[in-house]
Image (cartoon, helix red, strand yellow):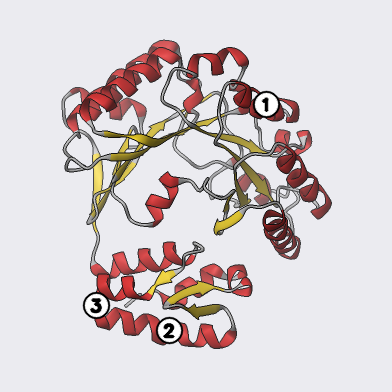
Amino acid sequence: MAGIYIHIPFCKQRCTYCDFYKEIGSADNQVDTFTDTLIQEIQLRKSYLNGDNIGTVYFGGGTPSVLNFNQFRRIFDEIHHVFNVDNDAEVTMEANPDDLTDAYLETLSSLPFNRLSIGIQSFNNKHLKIINRRHDAQQAKNAVINARKHGFQNISIDLIYALPGQTIEDWKKQLEEAFNLNVEHISAYGLTYEEGTALWKQRNKGLVKVTEDEVTLQMFNYMRLKMIEKGFESYEISNYAKPGFRSRHNSAYWQFVPYLGLGPSAHSFDGKSRQWNIASVQKYIQSISILKPSFEKEVLSEQDFYNDFIMVSLRTSDGISLADLKNRFGEELFDYCLQNADNQIKYGNLILNNNRLFLSDTGVHIANQVIIELMKTD
């Protein structure tokens, strides 16, 4: 099995926390030209996955919901023409809440989408304004209601906690609003101040009130308890799903399943190397037009792959399979991992059970530190 990720790099406005590649504002003809180029890239890179069946397709961004029915239809037609897509493939679209009107969702109903990922982030209008989201709380709720009305039975929402000035009481209210919508999946991320973003600059100038680390930890702990209480599985540090509704696309990333990334700045992985397209719509279009895709490539050394394996596996509820570790990397790295894990087990940050290593409840709080202890840097 393999996956396809499609990066739609257009947004109507820039959120203050976001450091993903995007273009702000776009004319209809620019999106049409981009769609033409994307279809051409599919043709140029059709051999990348070596004929593997496609089990997941994911439209991310940016804001994929800026595309209209005809643009989506053309992309899907090309994907199905070039690749063998499984009949039960998971097909996800990220969307802004205010785009998910009755009229827009009606146009999606005949497309292959069977999963929506809605970027709500908060139900608090004050916080939405601080991070420059273009929807309000009511539009966020309406988006889920409208999606249900149009037959979507697999809905994920994104939330952010530790927003500027946010209190633990407000975060409890946000979670309650989310649970009331009865969605199948919730991705919840602690706010990070990415260098160069508007929010990072505001913090450095003292224009926003940063949530204290102790409060952020309280928010995280409360969230994990409530998720379990409401029937969600914590299958990755930031991802929670009702049984049977884990993101198959993201899970495949964490299991190192090959995937093809299409569009500017999109990443691909073939099992041995990673490559990423140029982060410019204009240069992307130019390079594809002369049949010479512009990208950078990194061939992974065994140590690189081992470090990625440790980092990704420990963030998931499946943890590190020691049998898989030995099979992939041999005795030397297997022994290195166990030797470095020993202290973390003694401290109670790691649990060894059924030939697997997991983060404990306390280890989750310092996950990055524990992961670094197990990685090989020399």
Q: Amino acid at mark 3?
A: Gly
Mark 2 to mark 1: distance in Å? Answer: 49 Å
Residue 378: percent from the left, percent from the top? 31, 78
> Alpha-carbon neighbours of circle 1 within 10 Å: few (<14), some, or many (≥20)?
some
Q: Nearer the viewer, residue 52 or 273?
A: 52
- Residue on which disc 3 sits: 330
On the image, which quarter does residue 180 sit in? Answer: top right
Disc 2 element: helix
Mark 1 to mark 3: distance in Å? Answer: 51 Å
- Residue on which disc 1 sits: 145
- Residue on which disc 2 sits: 340
Mark 2 to mark 3: distance in Å? Answer: 16 Å
Residue drawn at x 58%, y 28% as measured from the top left: 96
Q: Residue furthest right?
A: 169
Q: Are marks 2 and 3 in contact (CB under 8 Å)?
A: no
Mark before the other along the chain sequence, 1 or 3: 1
Residue drawn at x 60%, y 51% as measured from the top left: 193
